[in-house]
Image (cartoon, helix red, strand yellow):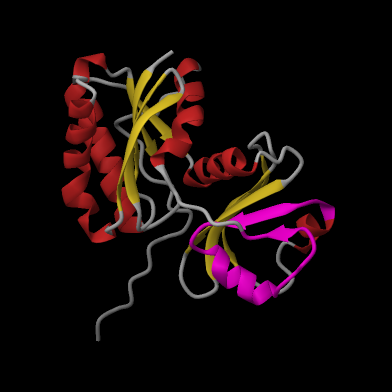
Amino acid sequence: MALLLNIDTATTVGSVCLSKDGEVLETIINQQQRDHAASMVLLVQTIMKNHGITQHELDAIAVSAGPGSYTGLRVGVATAKGLCYTWDKPLVAISTLQMMAQGMLLQQQDQTAYYVPMIDARRMEVFTAVYDATLQAVEAPSAHILEPSSYQSVIAEKEVYFFGDGAAKWQTLLGENVQHAHFPVYEISAAHMVPLAEKAFQNQSFANLAYFGPDYLKAFYHPSKK
């Protein structure tokens, strides 16, 4: 069992969560992406102070490792690595997409469905994967350009939950009232990584602090200035 600090800044919503033995103690959310760099350490200090916890009592720090916003991921991973170095703690890296699937699974409690988290990657592209109810990837994480033919095989097979900040454009493209396709409201949170982080800690599955970096899934593109 472990006392873990969980950090997520992969999207526009950033959050920190304190968990003990796989149970959420508290979650603090920051809705302003432009404030992630300035706010994360403050949020960490606040949540630990709220529970009278010092860095010596923490067992590890978990971070959502991507994919997601390039800037957001850099902030979260840099914060988590910096705290791990300073406090001499192991780092647990959790896939942002799997974390989201965990959150929706807890919300829906549907053990027979597929879970498809979608993070907006601009235009008609999303970072996505398809998970079953055991959180195993049926389709591996990828940067996927949405087309009307996307996901037809999984929709034909069973109930599918599409969610995340990239799901709205897929819903528009797919159309209304498609059998087996559901679009529930979802709010990303560091609390959703708690079961995954606890399991990783128990398995001693830690990231290499020296070499670990965010999983961007695709190279950063910046148009050349003319």
Q: Where is residue 85 in the image (x, y as percent from the top left)?
A: 21, 27
The region drawn magenta spans 157-183
- Indicate the quadrant where residue 172 lies: bottom right
Q: What residue sits 69% from the left and 38% below the top?
A: 133
- Residue 167 vertical placement versus 196 (above, below): below
Where 201 falls versus 6 (above or below)?
Answer: above
Name above or below for residue 207 compared with residue 224: above
Spot occupied by residue 215 in the image (x, y as percentages of width and height): 43, 47
Q: Give the image quarter of residue 206.
A: top left
Residue 220 position, x and y percent, is: 38, 63
Report whether residue 146 is seen: no
Question: Residue, x 35% and y 24% (percent of image)?
Answer: 4
Residue 35 or residue 147, whichever sits in front: 35
- Looking at the image, residue 151 sits to the left or right of residue 75; the answer is right
Q: In this view, does 50 lie to the left or right of 137?
A: left
Q: Does the magenta stretch include residue 159?
A: yes
Q: Does the magenta stretch include residue 169?
A: yes
Depth check: give the residue in front, 167 or 10.
167
